[in-house]
Image (tube, rainbow, N blue to C red):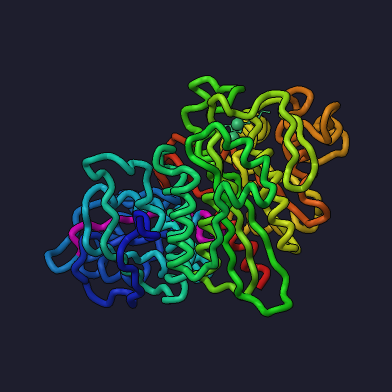
């Protein structure tokens, strides 16, 4: 595996066209105003005003995201021309710019193309250039990883008119990092399990200069990570903890921590899931995959800060040595937990991982986890649930999410929810008293392991994985929150 998953091979900046240029496809952006960009004008003039007439007549549509694909006009120009509507330019957002790039390129992956010229940068503001490139880079990413006949053909070269090389580089890094996260989540659970995930992490670390440490089951035992070991006990695949470090700041500067749930398959354990609930549970490592994607980007963007990323990797299975209902586990922190449902395994894993994370003394910590079905009941398929012990930090994350156009919503951490995870036998139990408020009682459980570190918990159970395709992406993994976390970390520089 290489880190440039499903990514166009060569991406470069070129000036707006001053004459027709040979290529497989020329992508022209059209704003609602109908105004022609320099490259569109070249095309229009070569065809006696055909483009402007087609826009005026509505044959070429300008609504945001609408595409019109047609054969090219002359032998020395593009074989195909794609027009993509941008809508009202004054209302364009970064996520819409990202989706424009993704939608355009995704549509061009039906057959192999050697050169695609993209003239979107001439139309949209330069503050959106990195976003549209990032989107375009994600356009070919898809879930058909094991179809023996290729179904998706990433363009071999993308040439961007009027986009600064630095915006191209930043967009490429972010887009490829999203593709890495998606790819790992889309991989089947017989391929991606704790050890193989850790191997990918080592490879990414080697390519990007991240420091990496992998704790195997012996080290986990030595470190007292009994909660991780309990959840992973019944699997033939032993657990791993991956610790990635980016040291871009000065000696005395603060550390930020990102932590991910990495359950490579969640059968539910002895509290076994029905088939309908188990079928997509390869996605239960999306938090860890997000951490790896974000760490890759942080390293390649050379952000001048310190970041530590931790991935808690286990497989939740069933065997004679499975952890049981009624078991009491002494976590790494020393706090004891009573297991009342082995399907509430993510919080048990995170209990140890958060404890390792706070030993790095981060000034702020964000965890990501496909933690609860209850969060999907509360917020639906597309919204990330946020819970916190720190109003300032959740404000920062909210702002970063708003900047990137990812959907987040805070759920309350009122004290009484914490009562529900108190145990009669141990310090805490791993489920609440009923199903009501299940996303929050899970977060209250986690809060026991973060001490006084400012912390935000992101429940991505809804948005991390969605079987339905959209114009801007294939079904399957979404890479949600990669952009938001990169932007949050960037805001620290
Ligand atoms: N991984 C699941 C949560 C999940 C559900 C993620 C659907 C993505 C899609 C988690 O480990 C789980 O099983 N949670 C239980 C908790 C319950 C037993 C308290 C749930 O949500 O039902
Ligand atoms: Mn579970
Ligand atoms: Zn789970």
Is 205 colored magenta in this rendering? no
Which image quarter has ligand 3? top right
Q: Residue at x 42, y 68 (%)?
A: 121
Q: Judge by depth and name the residue closer to the eye, 355 or 462.
A: 355
Q: Judge by depth and name the residue closer to the eye, 111 or 145.
A: 145
Quadrant housing residue 402: bottom right
Is 88 colored magenta in this rendering? yes
Q: Tell me: 310 left or right of 236.
A: right
- The vertical placement of 14 against 281, above or below, is below
**Quadrant of the drawing holding the N terminus:** bottom left
Q: Residue at x 68, y 69 (%)?
A: 492
Q: Residue at x 45, y 34 (%)?
A: 467
* x and y, in percent, of residue 198 in the image: 49, 52
Q: Tell me: 167 left or right of 49.
A: right
Q: Is residue 8 at least partly visible in the picture?
A: yes
Q: Is residue 437 at least partly visible in the picture?
A: no
> Which residues are drawn in magenta?
78-95
Q: Residue furthest top?
A: 274
- The vertical placement of 92 against 437, above or below, is below
């Amino acid at each position: 595996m290489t880190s440039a998953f499903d990514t166009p091979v060569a991406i470069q900046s070129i000036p707006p066209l001053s004459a027709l240029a040979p290529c497989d496809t020329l992508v022209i952006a059209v704003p609602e105003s109908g105004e022609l960009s320099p490259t569109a004008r070249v095309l229009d003039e070569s065809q006696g005003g055909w483009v402007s007439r087609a826009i005026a007549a509505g044959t070429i549509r300008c609504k945001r995201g609408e595409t019109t694909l047609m054969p090219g006009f002359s032998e020395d120009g593009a074989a195909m021309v794609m027009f993509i509507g941008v809508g009202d330019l004054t209302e364009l957002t970064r996520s819409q710019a990202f989706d424009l790039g993704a939608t355009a390129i995704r549509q061009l992956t039906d057959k192999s193309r050697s050169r695609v010229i993209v003239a979107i940068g001439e139309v949209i503001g330069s503050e959106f250039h990195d976003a549209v490139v990032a989107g375009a880079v994600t356009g070919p990413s898809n879930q058909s990883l094991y179809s023996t006949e290729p179904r998706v053909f990433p363009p071999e070269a993308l040439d961007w008119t009027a986009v600064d090389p630095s915006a191209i580089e930043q967009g490429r890094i972010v887009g490829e990092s999203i593709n890495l996260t998606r790819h790992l989540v889309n991989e089947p659970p017989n391929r991606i399990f704790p050890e193989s995930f850790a191997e990918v992490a080592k490879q990414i670390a080697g390519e990007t200069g991240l420091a990496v440490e992998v704790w195997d089951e012996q080290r986990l035992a030595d470190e007292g990570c009994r909660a991780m070991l309990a959840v992973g006990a019944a699997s033939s695949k032993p657990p791993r903890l991956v610790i990635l470090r980016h040291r871009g700041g000065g000696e005395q500067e603060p550390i930020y921590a990102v932590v991910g749930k990495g359950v490579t398959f969640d059968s539910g354990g002895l509290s076994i899931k029905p088939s309908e609930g188990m079928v997509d549970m390869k996605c239960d490592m999306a938090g860890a995959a997000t951490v790896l994607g974000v760490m890759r980007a942080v390293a390649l963007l050379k952000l001048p800060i310190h970041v530590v990323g931790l991935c808690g990797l286990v497989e939740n299975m069933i065997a004679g040595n499975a952890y049981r209902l009624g078991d009491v586990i002494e976590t790494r922190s020393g706090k004891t937990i009573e297991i009342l449902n082995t399907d509430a395994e993510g919080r048990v894993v995170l209990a140890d991982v958060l404890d390792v994370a706070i030993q790095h003394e981060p000034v702020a910590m964000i965890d990501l986890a496909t933690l609860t079905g209850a969060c999907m009941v509360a917020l639906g398929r597309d919204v990330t649930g946020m819970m916190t012990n720190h109003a300032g930090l959740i404000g920062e994350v909210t702002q970063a999410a708003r900047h990137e156009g990812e959907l987040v919503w805070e759920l309350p951490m009122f004290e009484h929810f914490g009562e529900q995870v108190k145990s009669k036998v141990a310090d805490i139990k791993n489920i609440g008293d009923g199903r009501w408020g299940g996303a929050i009682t899970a977060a209250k459980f986690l809060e026991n392991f973060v001490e006084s570190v400012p912390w935000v918990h992101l429940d991505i159970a809804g948005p991390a994985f969605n079987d339905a395709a959209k114009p801007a992406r294939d079904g399957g993994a979404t890479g949600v929150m990669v952009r938001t976390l990169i932007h949050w970390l960037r805001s620290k520089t």
